[in-house]
Amino acid sequence: MTAGTALWADRPWAPRSDAPPPRTGVLVVGGGITGLVAAIDLVARGVAVTVLEAGAAGSGASGRAFGSIALGCTATPGALTARHGAERALRMWRESSDAAGVFAGYLAELGLDAGFHRAGHVRVAVHRGQEEDIRAQYRQWRRLLPQEELRLAGGDELAAEFPGAGFRLGLVDERSASVDPYRLLGGLVAHFQERGGVYVEHARAEKILRQGNGFTVRHPAGETTAEHVVVATNGHTDGLLPRLGRRVYPVGSYMIATAALPPDSRAALSRRTVTTAHVRKNYFRLTGEGRLVYGGRLNLATGLTPAQVKTRLHNSMLGYFPALADVEVTHAWGGRLGFTFDQVPHLGTDDGVHYAVGYCGRGLPMAVHLGRQVARRVLGLPVETTFADTPFPTRWYFRRTPWFLPPTATAHRLRDLARRR
Ligand SMILES: Cc1cc2nc3c(=O)[nH]c(=O)nc-3n(C[C@H](O)[C@H](O)[C@H](O)COP(=O)(O)OP(=O)(O)OC[C@H]3O[C@@H](n4cnc5c(N)ncnc54)[C@H](O)[C@@H]3O)c2cc1C
């Protein structure tokens, strides 16, 4: 299990520790952003809601994320079209991009201060072999997202924003933003509890049993009966719902944070979020307090130690910023992304249990969006998403362990090497 304390937890908050009640209206399994957003919309309608969180609040991906609120989704438009047809693919693509706006609107609606900062995002070509990829993405995005402010940035502009990094070409979108995910989660927990919600830490749902018109959920403190159950476990999905456990697999994602940069380096760097055009991409951003936060998926598997993460990501970071060699790396951590085999999220109902999972690394905006939608499903309202009730593929070779990830990471590395010219 990946450990390491996220930079964001330097300013910890502690939720009130509630006891699980014997009975509740809706029981939500998973106390990350999806579960809490759903729970908040339900308590706002007067429903009694209990959230069970297996670990400490913030120990899942929602408390550990990089914090990018970006446009688009993980599946390429081509892959979406091949699977879902052009019309549905376009709706999925636009909905994923609109989730950034849904996210910003939600923070405003709840009055949450989560360090939201809109400085745009840029995907950069590091090698000449990646430039055509950036141009092709630009042409495609202009067709798919005509309403967005998108443009290409040349090497000179990028050199002014990221001196010394050697970026050759970038696709800039001005609407993307960043957020402190842990602070967001703390705000959500507080909001939920203030409105009478029950948030139980260290309470793993062990079994969901159907009983009459409702459910009984077993957990370490006993049992809770509920009229409805929502599963919001994303990259921590296991065999609790066997069908889901065979359709969502965990992918490791890792981060380091430096100490505050020297004033000169800090003043020179743009606050855009940046992603490299590698298949095995890296991403980074400057935080409000002047630290560089740098991440990547490394071997895709979960379970690298903080020491391994620190060494690998630090070396990678110095490839772009050799001048930061003397700046201390103060934090190294990782977490679990929830991936699906069609690389899109899924909202659905399995034998009466509702779920929203599988954000494939784009979960901050989509967890807010689909968290709200799964609450609508519980309330019996029509859901407003293209990601509901679509065919949810599995693979015969995946049971419990995603053994295929390290070989996939090697294949990605070879593809990146082939474009390194
Ligand atoms: C290092 C890292 C960087 C990331 N960066 C970004 C980014 O920049 N932008 C972006 O959009 N997304 C990013 N993500 C992804 C994003 O964080 C997730 O998609 C999102 O937080 C998912 O929220 P969630 O609530 O669905 O899942 P989680 O936050 O993972 O919460 C699920 C929770 O379910 C709990 N759980 C599991 N099983 C049980 C059980 N049986 N009983 C009770 N509880 C259970 C887990 O303990 C966990 O806390 C990143 C993720 C990581 C790890």
Image: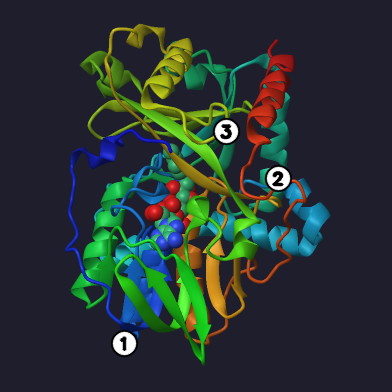
x, y percentage for residue 341?
Answer: 70, 50
Between discs 1 and 2, the one toward the N terminus: 1
Q: Which residue is mark 3?
A: 300
- Of 307 and 316, nearer the camera is 307
Compared with residue 114, is residue 412 higher up or lower down, i.e. above or below? Answer: above
Relative placement, left or right, of 222 versus 146 is left
Disc 2 element: loop
Query: Callout 2, which amino acid?
Result: Thr
Compared with residue 54, is residue 149 higher up or lower down, i.e. above or below? Answer: above
**Quarter of the figure with the C terminus:** top right
Q: Which residue is mark 2?
A: 76
Cα–Cα gap, marks 1 and 2: 40 Å
Q: Which residue is mark 1?
A: 46
Disc 1 element: loop
- Of 246 and 393, nearer the camera is 246
Q: Is mark 2 within 8 Å of ligand 1?
A: no
The answer to the question of whether label 1 and label 2 lie on touching residues, with beta carbons closer than 8 A, is no
